[in-house]
Amino acid sequence: MPDAKSDLALERVAVAKSRIQSILDRDTVCNQKTLEQKIAEQGPKPMRVDPHLVGLALLDLLQLNRLSSHTHESTKIAWFANPGTKAALVAERLAELAPLYAQITGNGFGNLTGDALELVVWKCLEEQFSAKRRFAYQGHFDLTKPKKNGRYSRVAPSKTLNGKTTTGEADFYQFGYDEGALFIECKNYREWFYPHQSLIKELIIKADALDAIPVLIVRRLHYTTRTNFLEPAGIIAHESLLQYYPADQAALAEQVKHARKLGFTDVTATEQPHARTRKFFSQLLPTLVPRMAANWFANRSALVAYAKDELNLAQLYTEIGSPAGGKWEEKSAAENSSALDDPPF
């Protein structure tokens, strides 16, 4: 078993392997992200397995010749089937699924989904500002102009803040807190965010450059990212638990959500914030900022050193007083996120 370093991890990988083959018995062909969705986020909780362990399960099944890997001309990723599945059935399913997957991973569709989450966050910021005028913000969309290439006109926030200028760009700034401005970054990816991901380093660098407090809005965080890293570091984070699509992509969203297609059941095609995200901005964020800002400014030098690769993650955990400080181990790329997978979308 590659990179599974504990009995508990081996047990969870065994559960994932069983579920992979059961899902493929039913669905014939799946890619890794579909398997991660079905195994990490669906089914009874005792049967759910974190995405990085699903990746290890796939690697082990391939090495044991208990899984076959296939390709399709419309995508650059692996598609999996159980050994012995008839070639005609595999081809039929690939012809249905691969072009659909290509539609949501190519041709600039990532820009549309990125905009979709940003639009939702902007509406939350506007609601908060309308209720309490001290919560001014920068960054907005102009909905009065027609879309161009499927995208609303967006006005980015200034790259100068607090007398400092940066080449990095925030999605939004929010003001009104005694502790300072918030630097808000939105990432509408399918992937769960793990502690090692480079996007967290980029956020640290950009927020530090403008003397602002970082806020990360994502679909899902692995629990270790929140408890071991972001909370002790002072990086505010919110999980939307949804992947937003533009409202005019409702028909595509229904296909993507279908259990017998890609099975991304959390996809929602809307321009309106879900109650969870609205509550985060209006009620939770104001209570979080004082404590998290204190952590951020206390740990900022260590976080910047980590972001510049001057500290590794284990060293950072010790520096920031993480619950994992002094005992966390650097893990291989395979254990952190499977090398089988394609880039985030």
Image: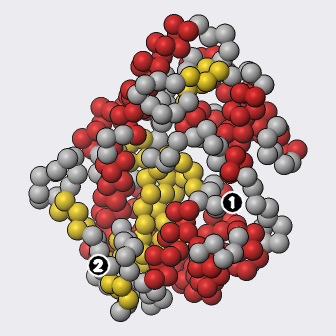
Quarter location, residue 160: bottom left
Residue at 42% of width from left, 84% of height from top? 210
* Lower sequence index among marks 1 and 2: 2
Label 2 CA crowd tier, 10 Å (few <14, some 14–19, many 20+): some
Examine the rendered structure and indicate whether residue 150 appears above or below residue 218: above
Residue 309, position as x, y percentages in the image: 63, 72
Residue 65 lies, in percent from the top left, at 74, 21
Relative image position of residue 194 (x, y in whole percent): 62, 57
Tell me how far mark 1 sits from mark 2, CA to CA: 33 Å
Residue 192 located left or right of residue 336: left
Above or below: residue 220 compared with residue 229: above
Q: Amino acid at mark 2?
A: Ser
Residue at 42% across, 61% down: 186
| Residue 27 relative to residue 338: left or right | left
Question: Of the numbered discs in the image, which one, if any, rests on residue 158?
Answer: 2
Judge left or right: residue 23 versus residue 335.
left
Q: Residue furthest right?
A: 7
Looking at the rendered structure, the kind of residue marked 1 is Thr
Q: Looking at the rendered structure, which numbered label has been put on residue 224?
A: 1
* Front in this rendered view, residue 106 or 147: 106
